[in-house]
Image: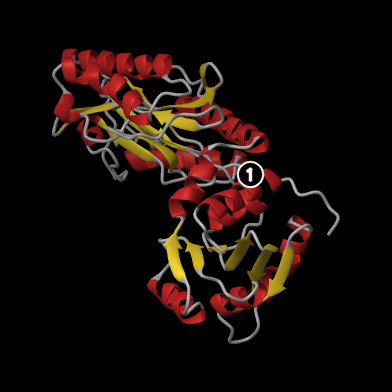
Amino acid sequence: MAEENPFDERLESLVRRAVRRRLDAVLLFGEANIRAVTDVVCDNGCLVVSPHAAPTFITDFRYVPMAHRVAPWLKTVQLKRGQTFADAAKAALPRGVRRLGYEGSVPACRYRSLLKAFRRAELVDVAEDVLALRAVKTLPEIAKITRAVALNDEIWSLARKEMRPGMTEKDIQRIIRGFMNALGDGEAFETIVCAGANAAECHHVPDDTVWRRGEPLLVDMGVKLDGVCSDMTRCVRGRGEEYGDVYSIVLEANRAAIAAARPGMTCGALDKVARDIIRKAGYGKAFGHSLGHGVGYEIHEEPTARSKSKTVLEPGMFVTIEPGIYLEGKLGVRIEDLVLITPDGCEVVTRSPK
Ligand code: ZN
Ligand code: ZN
């Protein structure tokens, strides 16, 4: 129990948020949420955090030794046979819980078990608080994500050397996947490969469409490494005047947003920088998604750079800058980089040429 706890800071801010919201305790079930405050990776656990008790991790028999090894500073309790997490959490807390924080995303059966165990308590959804906490990365997380992004860049350049016109989208997906499995921990999400007009579908599922010579190709890929994700979109440019024009507009929007990203700016204002360029070029309706998202243990995290978002950028946040223009039946262009917000602007972590 005397071991140092590297997650003190995040746990403390979780407790501070709990106190601010007059919560007696917060129960976390989400794998990425638990990991972000303990480093414990477990899909069947409950972390109990409270201003009135030491942090306690409840899990079943299978995960107890792992929790002891990864987080020796954390009190780990083994779930008894037939006991619900809610009952075990209640036993780990002082009596009289009045307000209980939980993740609004829990399954209905779990929610009902919380209602049953904490009959007198008011349940308060704190999912957003936890996501906000995770949005600002710790130094080890920044190092890990930076390494994952560098590996993703390397895989893209290796794959480029093997990709040839005449291959199908699936062939190219297999090449990229192969490198991700060999050099990293696999895909952070299913690699998207779109030949020609298929790129007009933002999240096209690769099929047997052949990539023809002179045709553009869009690839959205992210390798997973040491538990964290990376995310990048690159287009191999194709022939055609309209394609060239659209590519230049998207690139301009991408560069302008990167130049603008800085702490203190709202996510809505960042989205607007890119959106204004695309709108003024006459393609406003063809950019139907938000500018970007955070990346971490999960592929989509906070902050979300979307229109009107009031979330303020802070140093230590990662956010993708991924404007796009999609013309159904014709073409699609998206250019996606990952940036890290720094004290005086942002650092572009993605290095692949665009
Ligand atoms: Zn992506
Ligand atoms: Zn993305």
Q: Position of residue 14 (x, y in %)?
A: 58, 50
Task: Tell me the SS state at disc 1.
Answer: loop
Across the whole image, how many numbered discs are drawn on residues?
A: 1
Q: Residue 296's spot in the image, x, y percent? A: 53, 41
267 above or below 41? above
Q: Is residue 261 visible?
A: yes
Instruction: Name the residue at 59% across, 67% down.
Output: 45
In screen coordinates, is 19 left or right of 114?
right
Q: Amino acid at mark 1?
A: Asp
Reply above or below: 307 against 27: above
Which of these two is toward me, 152 or 124?
124
Pick the front one: 311 or 153 = 311
- The residue drawn where x is 60% and y is 46% is 13
Residue situated in front as seen by the camera: 108 or 300: 108
- Residue 29 rendering spot, x and y as whole percentages: 53, 63
The part of the image, by quadrant, that contains residue 321 is: top left
Image quadrant in which the C terminus is located: top left
Quadrant in the picture for the N terminus: bottom right
Residue shown at the point (16%, 22%) measured from the top left: 283
| In front of the other: 53 or 55 | 53
Q: Quadrant of ligand 2?
A: top left
Question: Dot 1 corresponds to which residue?
Answer: 226
- Residue 23 locus on image (x, y percent): 53, 60
